[in-house]
Image: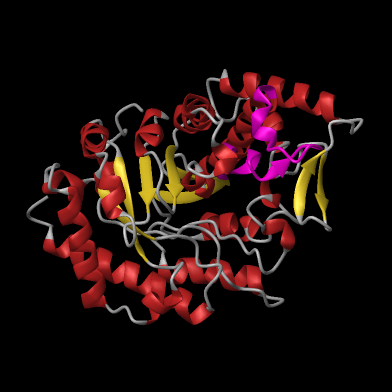
Amino acid sequence: MEKLKGSICKEKLSLAFTGIGSLPFCSDNAPDEAVDFVFDYCNDFPFWPQLPHFKTEENMTCQFLKGFSGIEFNKKHQKFYLNIEDKNFIQSLKIIKEDFKTAFSSNSIFENEEILNKYEITLPYSSTMGIFLNKIKNSKQKPQLIKGTITGPFTLSTSIYDKNDKFIYHNKEIREIIAEFLALKALWQIKEIKKISDEIIPVIFIDEPSLSKLDSPLCTDIKKEDIILILKTVSDSIQKFGGLSGIHCCGKTDWNMIIKSGACIINFDAYCYSENISRYSNSIEFFLKKGGFLAFGIIPTLDKEALLNLDNKKLYEKFQNSIDILSKNIDKTLILKQSFITPGCGCGSLSIDLSKKAMTLAKELSTALKKENEVKI
């Protein structure tokens, strides 16, 4: 990870807030409702929303598969399988590899626009992307930060199986091409955001919930060095073309591995797992001193009961407790200066009312922290 570019970027990120991605809207008007929700609650740092209950194509596995031949959904087993006998499969891999090589070697995100357009995320895989981008394009005061997302290469390649019911991750060539494929999906988002204004900084989160399962029996033969390589492929691509890369994991994982990937932002579930990440305090301190940011997922979106019982006071105390745990070995001012607020995970599993509560709490915590730390930071 290179140092974060520009004081404006750091200033805008410090103690800001944004969402993770999924929202629960599912009515006929869900795409417009979701985008309106984002700008009602998160206008300064809007995030592109996904609607898994509105369209099955917006499920985090399915949403990024367009353009990768041979993947089929088995209804009986409720799993995605890769059929390497698909007549287009081998040619598809060659095209992706060549497209990535060409795009990554470009001097500008617009130099190979036709290539990136092959990796667009549009209908039916996103009902909101066009509306979201148009909303920003037509706004008089444009945000300086915009959050996009992709499913991470580890999570995607361990969500798809071969004919022997093994993760396709275990095929070295395929997992590396999946990382390049997802990098192209991220670069398309950066291109579309930069077309609106070159002053906007795209923040692309790489969603890796499956990294919390590394201790499971299914992952015993997986080497962390291989995971770092595929994460780095995506992260480096995002950063090369003016974006900030974040890695989101909503459980326990090896945070040293995340840091070694070179990502700019670590997004962790601070409500449940602050003790876990504090075990990596030496690496976290190094990460922060290089300009990295921690995104505190402090709103418990995966625990409806906890969210129902949460108020501003309890949330503030929970955040301070999380900071206290981390600051036992790291300067507290450094942590606060290079942190921002998110929900612990997406709001897709919540009701609309609870989603509103989650984002309201995030906004009010951010406002309180900025006011309190205005002089100190």
> Horizontal placement of 376 versus 107: left or right?
left
Q: Nearer the viewer, residue 66 or 371?
A: 66
Which residue is at a point 28% across and 71% down the rendered structure image? 364
Q: Is residue 359 above or below residue 44?
A: below
Residue 346 in percent (x, y) is at 50, 62
The magenta stretch is 151-173
Which residue is at a point 63% across and 64% down the rendered structure image? 51
> Horizontal placement of 251 versus 50: left or right?
left
Q: Residue furthest left?
A: 375
Q: Residue furthest front?
A: 217
Residue 271 in percent (x, y) is at 32, 62
Splitting the image into 4 quarters, where does residue 186 fall? top right
Q: Within the magenta stretch, is there residue 86? A: no
Q: How many marks?
A: 0
Can I make out residue 113 in this image? no
Q: Is residue 50 above or below residue 192?
A: below
Splitting the image into 4 quarters, where does residue 154 fall? top right
Q: Nearer the viewer, residue 153 or 105?
A: 153
Here the colouring is secondary structure
Q: Quadrant of the N terminus?
A: top left
Residue 185 in percent (x, y) is at 62, 39
Q: Nearer the viewer, residue 206 or 39?
A: 206
Q: Residue furthest right?
A: 87
Which residue is at a point 58% across and 71% down the rendered structure image? 24
Residue 269 in percent (x, y) is at 37, 56
Which residue is at a point 25% across and 38% down the rendered structure image? 284
Splitting the image into 4 quarters, where does residue 320 fall? bottom left
Q: Nearer the viewer, residue 323 or 252?
A: 252
Can I make out residue 250 in this image? yes
